[in-house]
Image (cartoon, rainbow, N blue to C red):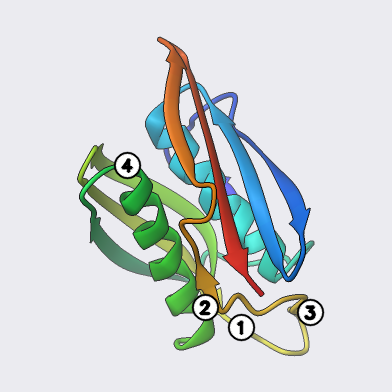
Amino acid sequence: MQNGNNIPETAYRIIDHTSDVGLELEASTLTGLFVAAAEGLMHIICPHCQIKPAQSHPLQVCGENLEELLVNWLSELNYLCQVQRFLTARVKITEIHERFLQAEVTGETRDPLRHAMRSEIKAVTYHRIEVHQEAADKWRGRIYMDL
């Protein structure tokens, strides 16, 4: 996934868990952490898919804190994928703070001939969720999803 924010040093690592899958996230900014979460989500759903940036969707999500904001962010991206059959290729976060995120996601409608789906995510959960800043240029997070 290309990130429209040109955010350096973002990363995600998939965590296997019984009937769940998780992501450990690391980035130099809060924006980068949420971009990495979106990238990880798409990798879980459709690994190695070549997704074209053909359409855009504006998104806004709110939460009471960063953890709830992350759950709502990934839930919205999962909704786009599961209900509207939209796969995200690129994320551009235009505003983010502790209780609000505004972004534009670009991608395309799922094509069964080109996009081999690996997993369907039933729900993004609060199980062992973490979002925190470790240093001025280091954010970490962890989140699990029910498969």
Is residue 52 positioned above or below 68 on the image? below
Mark 3 or mark 2: name the one nearer the start of the chain: 2
Q: Amino acid at mark 2?
A: Cys
Disc 2 marks which residue? 81
What amino acid is found at the position of numbered circle 3 in the picture?
A: Ala
Q: Which mark is residue 116?
A: 3
Real-space Cα separation, disc 3 to disc 2, in angstroms: 13 Å
For numbered disc 1, what is the local secondary structure?
A: loop
Viewer-proximal residue among 121 and 33:
121
4 or 3: tag closer to the N-terminus: 4
**Mark 4 or 1, closer to the camera:** 4
First in residue order: circle 2 vs circle 4: 4
Q: Which residue is mark 1?
A: 110
Q: Residue at x 39, y 35 (%)?
A: 31
User: Is disc 2 in contact with disc 1, using a CB cutoff of under 8 Å?
Assistant: yes
Disc 4 to disc 1, how far (Cα)?
Answer: 30 Å
Q: Is residue 116 visible?
A: yes
Q: Quadrant of the C terminus?
A: bottom right
Q: CA distance from mark 4 to mark 3?
A: 32 Å
Q: Quadrant of residue 73?
A: bottom left
Q: Residue at x 49, y 46 (%)?
A: 129
Q: Earlier in the sequence, mark 2 or mark 1?
A: 2
Q: Position of residue 19 (x, y in %)?
A: 73, 71
Left or right of residue 119, residue 80 in this image: left
